[in-house]
Image (cartoon, rainbow, N blue to C red):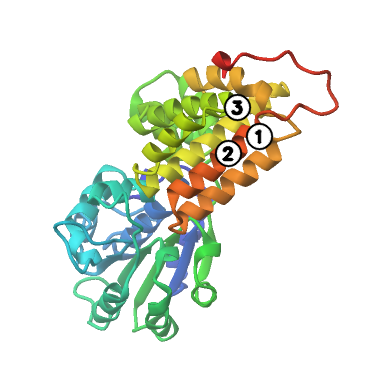
């Protein structure tokens, strides 16, 4: 992957190429930034640039034997570790057993999110981890001499998913790495990484992609009008992954929208019997989709609050979602929005930590029944809105 394929982030590109030029490459670097900011594509481009046999001032040549292998993610001195779990076909899961799927996903979308990766390997209902077997593989792979390039490069994607009990294995090789070895850790959550690992890396912090660069990338990818691309860029808040979701209108997004509308109607009507049925259905969709649903709900609450207080310029939703947010907005106000957000964040955390989804969603539903009835403070009472508008 070339630096020119990475959307925006020009300051980081310049910084990385300068370290190669000055021969001051830190042996362990942590690329950390929000979803869709390009941390993994940048790590891939940096690795290719370091190994390129005819590199230019700002990018790889993309023609030499090394670059050709990098374009297929098959260079013998490039290694990957990433979260996995067992499936029907794969027991004692390791990254190596999913290497074919990994390469296919990188070819298709190097900006992929963790749920997208889980979906690709069929573990949507499980949490992926970096386990003991993978840590052993890191040590084994890097103990060998480089085959072709000057550096052996290990890209560890999402080190926050490292199984804590095996962290000492990784710490040891980070402290005393073999000569000409480079670790590139790629994360979206610095706080989720074991602190002793973070302390042994040079941190490269990513910001959200600037709107102009993201808009240009969306316009080119989908061949749409410039104004529409700019609107998608604004709505996605510098998140390329979200921009793609908006453009492709994924089934998950439509599923989340319908489930949220139904849920709020049932909560408003205090229909406990149907709420129990809703909770039962949602508890079966898998942990990653449940987390995605919670993220969608938080976006809708934010949009409804902005509409209620006439700050529509900050909206991140469009189309039918925006229409629903307008109808739902009278129910989200200063008297309940803080508590709503807190409850949803708590439930998201509980689901992420393998909590019982049925209990968490039922508890959340009962709390929403109460929160939707709270009147807006310091304002004239609003006209009661029929449940059909929710």
Mark closer to the chain start, 3 or 2: 3
Residue 313 in picture, x, y percent from top left = 65, 24
Residue 45 in picture, x, y percent from top left = 35, 55
Residue 307 in picture, x, y percent from top left = 66, 22
Q: Are marks 3 and 1 in contact (CB under 8 Å)?
A: no
Q: Is residue 341 above or below residue 302?
A: below
Residue lying at 44% horizontally and 53% vertically, measured from the top left: 356
Q: Would you call the spot at circle 2 few (<14 residues within 10 Å), some (14-19), or many (20 or more)?
A: some
- Residue position for label 2: 366
Helix, strand or loop status at disc 3: loop
Q: Quadrant of the C terminus?
A: top right
Q: Are marks 1 and 2 in contact (CB under 8 Å)?
A: yes
Q: How many numbered marks are there?
A: 3
- Residue position for label 3: 315
- Which quadrant of the view contains residue 330? top right
Query: In whole angstroms, how far apart are the C-alphas of marks 3 and 2?
Result: 28 Å
Q: Are marks 3 and 2 in contact (CB under 8 Å)?
A: no
Q: Would you call the spot at circle 3 few (<14 residues within 10 Å), some (14-19), or many (20 or more)?
A: many
Query: In whole angstroms, how far apart are the C-alphas of marks 3 and 1?
Result: 26 Å
Residue lying at 47% horizontally and 65% vertically, measured from the top left: 30
Residue lying at 39% horizontally and 54% vertically, measured from the top left: 40
Helix, strand or loop status at disc 1: helix
The label shown at residue 370 is 1
Q: Is residue 252 above or below residue 141?
A: above
Query: In whole angstroms, how far apart are the C-alphas of marks 1 and 2?
Result: 7 Å
- Would residue 247 be found to the left or right of residue 34 on screen? left
Question: Can the viewer see residue 217 in this picture?
Answer: no
- Which quadrant of the view contains residue 136? bottom left
- Would residue 78 be found to the left or right of residue 207 on screen? left
């Amino acid at each position: 992957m070339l630096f020119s394929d990475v959307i925006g982030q020009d300051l980081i590109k310049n910084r990385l190429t300068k370290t190669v030029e000055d021969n001051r490459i830190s042996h362990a670097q942590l690329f950390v930034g929000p979803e869709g900011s390009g941390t993994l594509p940048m790590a891939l481009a940096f690795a290719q640039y370091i190994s390129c046999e005819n590199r230019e001032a700002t990018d790889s040549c993309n023609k030499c034997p090394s670059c050709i292998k990098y374009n297929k993610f098959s260079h013998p001195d490039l290694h990957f570790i990433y979260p996995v779990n067992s499936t029907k076909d794969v027991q004692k899961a390791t990254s190596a057993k999913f290497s074919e799927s990994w390469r296919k996903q990188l070819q298709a979308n190097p900006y992929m999110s963790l749920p997208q990766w889980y979906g690709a390997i069929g573990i949507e209902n499980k949490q992926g981890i970096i386990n003991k077997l993978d840590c052993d593989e890191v040590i084994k792979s890097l103990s060998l001499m480089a085959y072709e390039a000057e550096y052996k490069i290990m890209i560890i994607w999402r080190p926050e998913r490292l199984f804590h009990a095996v962290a000492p294995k990784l710490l040891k090789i980070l402290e005393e790495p073999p000569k000409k070895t480079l670790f590139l850790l790629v994360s979206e959550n610095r706080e989720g990484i074991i602190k002793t690992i973070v302390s042994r890396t040079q941190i490269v912090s990513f910001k959200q992609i600037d709107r102009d660069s993201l808009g240009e990338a969306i316009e080119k990818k989908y061949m749409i009008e410039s104004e529409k691309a700019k609107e998608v860029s604004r709505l996605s808040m510098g998140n390329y992954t979200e921009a793609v979701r908006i453009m492709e209108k994924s089934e998950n997004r439509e599923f989340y929208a319908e489930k949220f509308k139904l849920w709020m109607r049932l909560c408003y009507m205090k229909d406990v019997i149907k709420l129990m049925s809703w909770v039962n259905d949602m508890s079966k969709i898998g942990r990653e989709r449940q987390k995605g649903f919670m993220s969608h709900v938080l976006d809708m609450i934010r949009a409804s609050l902005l509409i209620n207080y006439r700050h529509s310029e900050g909206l991140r939703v469009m189309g039918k979602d925006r229409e629903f947010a307008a109808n739902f907005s009278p129910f989200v106000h200063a008297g309940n929005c803080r508590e709503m957000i807190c409850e949803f964040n708590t439930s998201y955390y509980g689901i992420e930590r393998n909590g019982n989804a049925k209990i968490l969603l039922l508890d959340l539903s009962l709390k929403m029944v109460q929160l939707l009835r709270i009147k807006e403070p310091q304002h004239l009472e609003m006209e009661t809105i029929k449940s059909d508008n929710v």
